[in-house]
C-alpha cells in the first residue's frame, strides 16, 4: 500500500501563495488609495494596515505550528519506507526511514497543536535494542489515509 499526500501539499502551497498575494494587494491598496484619509475618521489607513498585518502574522504562526509535512509511505517490498519533509521556504532537509518489516516493533501516535493534529513515532529493533525515531507530523495527511496507515502498521507490529 502506498500513501502520498502530494495533492494536500499543493493545496497548502497554493493557499499560502494566494493568502500572501491577497495580503500584499490589500496593504498596497490601503496605503496608496485615499479612501481612509478622511479627516475626523477614528480609523486611519495605518490602523488598518496594522490590523491586517496582525491577522496575517497570526494565521502564518498557526500554519507554522501545524508543521505540515510531505509524507510518503510504501510497504510493497520487504521494507517499510517513510519519506517526509517539512513544507516551508527554508527547509530543504528531506528525511527517509526504511525499516525492514521483521525489525519493526511498534508505532505510537501523539497529539499536538491543541490535540487536533497527530505525530507518528516509529520503533525498530536495532542492535539488540529498540530504537525510537523522531516524530513525523501527519497534519497534512487526510484522516482516511491516517487510518489506513495505522491499520497497516498495526498489522506489522502485531507480528512480533
Image (spheres, grey):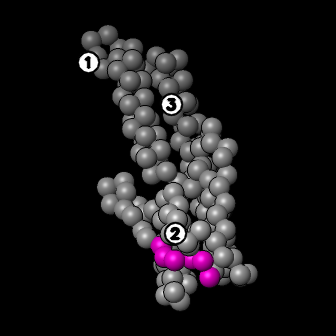
What is the CA distance from the residue labelled 1 to the residue labelled 2?
A: 67 Å
Q: Residue under label 1, please give it.
A: 42
Residue 11 visible, this orientation:
no
Residue 130 visible, this orientation:
yes
| 78 or 45, nearer to the observer | 78
Identify whether 133 is placed above or below 42. below
Q: Position of residue 70 (x, y in %)?
A: 61, 58
Q: Position of residue 121 (x, y in %)?
A: 48, 65
Q: Nearer the viewer, mark 1 or mark 2?
A: 2
Residues at circles 1 and 3 in contact by the CB criterion of under 8 Å: no
> Residue 152's image quarter?
bottom right
What is the CA distance from the residue labelled 2 to the residue labelled 3?
A: 57 Å
Q: Is residue 7 left or right of residue 142?
A: right
SS category of the residue bearing label 2 = strand
First reached walking from the N terminus: tag 2 or tag 3: 3
| 116 or 32, nearer to the observer | 116
Q: Residue at x 58, y 68 (%)?
A: 126
Look at the image and give the residue range highlighted in magenta: 102-107
Main SS of residues in magenta: strand
Q: Residue under label 2, please give it.
A: 129
Identify whether 28 is placed above or below 57. above
SS category of the residue bearing label 3 = helix
First reached walking from the N terminus: tag 1 or tag 3: 3
Number of other residues with Cα within 10 Å of mark 2, as a class: few under 14, some 14 to 19, many 20 or more: few
Residues at circles 2 and 3 in contact by the CB criterion of under 8 Å: no
Q: Residue under label 3, please give it.
A: 26
Q: Position of residue 48 (x, y in %)?
A: 37, 25
Amino acid at each position: 500500500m502506498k500513501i502520498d499526500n502530494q495533492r494536500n501539499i499543493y493545496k497548502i502551497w497554493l493557499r499560502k501563495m494566494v493568502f500572501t498575494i491577497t495580503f500584499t494587494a490589500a496593504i498596497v491598496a490601503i496605503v496608496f488609495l485615499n479612501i481612509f484619509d478622511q479627516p475626523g475618521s477614528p480609523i486611519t489607513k495605518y490602523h488598518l494596515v496594522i490590523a491586517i498585518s496582525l491577522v496575517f502574522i497570526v494565521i502564518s504562526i498557526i500554519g507554522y505550528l501545524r508543521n505540515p509535512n510531505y509524507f510518503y509511505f510504501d510497504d510493497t517490498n520487504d521494507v517499510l519506507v517513510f519519506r517526509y519533509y517539512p513544507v516551508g521556504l527554508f527547509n530543504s532537509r528531506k528525511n527517509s526511514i526504511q525499516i525492514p518489516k521483521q525489525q519493526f516493533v511498534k508505532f505510537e501516535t501523539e497529539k499536538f497543536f491543541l490535540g487536533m493534529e497527530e505525530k507518528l513515532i516509529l520503533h525498530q529493533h536495532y542492535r539488540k535494542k529498540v530504537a525510537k525515531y523522531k516524530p513525523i507530523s501527519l497534519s497534512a495527511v487526510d484522516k482516511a489515509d491516517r487510518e489506513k496507515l495505522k491499520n497497516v502498521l498495526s498489522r506489522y507490529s502485531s507480528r512480533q
